Amino acid sequence: MSWNVIDLPGARIEEFDTTKVFNIGQTCKARNTANGYIGEFVYMQGVASCVVGAWACLNYDTGIVNLLIDTDVGGVGIAMSASVASTFGWFQIRGKAAGSLAASCADNAELYTTSVAGVVDDALTGQFQVFGARCAETVTGAAVAEVEIHYPQVAGPDAA
């Protein structure tokens, strides 16, 4: 997917920055050039071993990000670029996105954290639900696939 930023001049959604260009937590909107959909993104510090499409747990207080695993709780976003801890970049928090799925996924399926960092699944095997996220296409096998997100978050075991 390719994006044109709508409301923040100089923002490059699909690239990481080696120095901080925007305030941590800054948001912006962009239009997908392929389908016209609008997405919303948040600027955060990068995380080691992060790839495009990885799901991340976002700490808005500190600006620190970690790849989402099945014990995390908090806000969630999808990485728009590969990054490391010494870089800064954008994470999608609303709209149609490309997110990493662990295995086959049914269209409109709810998504859950897994023990694999940065990857979600539609199978509930003791993990937490990622509220505000669902698969947006039928997928066979592990893939980076279309998902729909609306300020996703993991609330933990007492949320249901």
Image: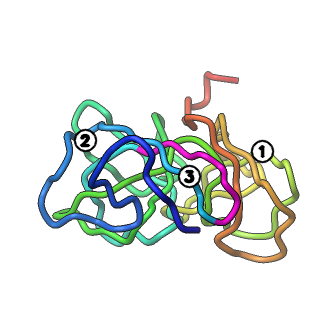
Region rendered in magenta: 34-41
Q: CA distance from mark 3 to mark 2?
A: 25 Å
| Picture coordinates of residue 112, whole percent (x, y) | 67, 48
- Secondary structure found at label 3: strand
Magenta includes 39?
A: yes
Q: x, y (%) of residue 28?
A: 40, 41
At 31% across and 57% down in the image, what residue appears? 89
For the residues labelled 3 and 1, say whether their Cβ atoms are less than 8 Å apart: no
Task: Say above or below: 101 vs 73.
Answer: below
Residue lying at 87% horizontally and 64% vertically, measured from the top left: 138
**Badge 3 amino acid:** Arg
Q: Which residue is mark 2?
A: 63
Horizontal placement of 64 versus 90: left or right? Answer: left
Q: Earlier in the sequence, mark 3 or mark 2?
A: 3
Residue 44: assigned label: none
CA separation in Å, label 2 and label 1: 27 Å
Q: Residue at x 54, y 67 (%)?
A: 2
Q: Report the disc number at residue 31.
A: 3
How far separated are the C-alphas under marks 3 and 1?
Answer: 25 Å
Task: Write down the residue under mark 1.
Answer: 110
**Which amino acid type corresponds to the residue marked 2 in the rendered image?**
Gly
- Residue most extreme to the left: 19
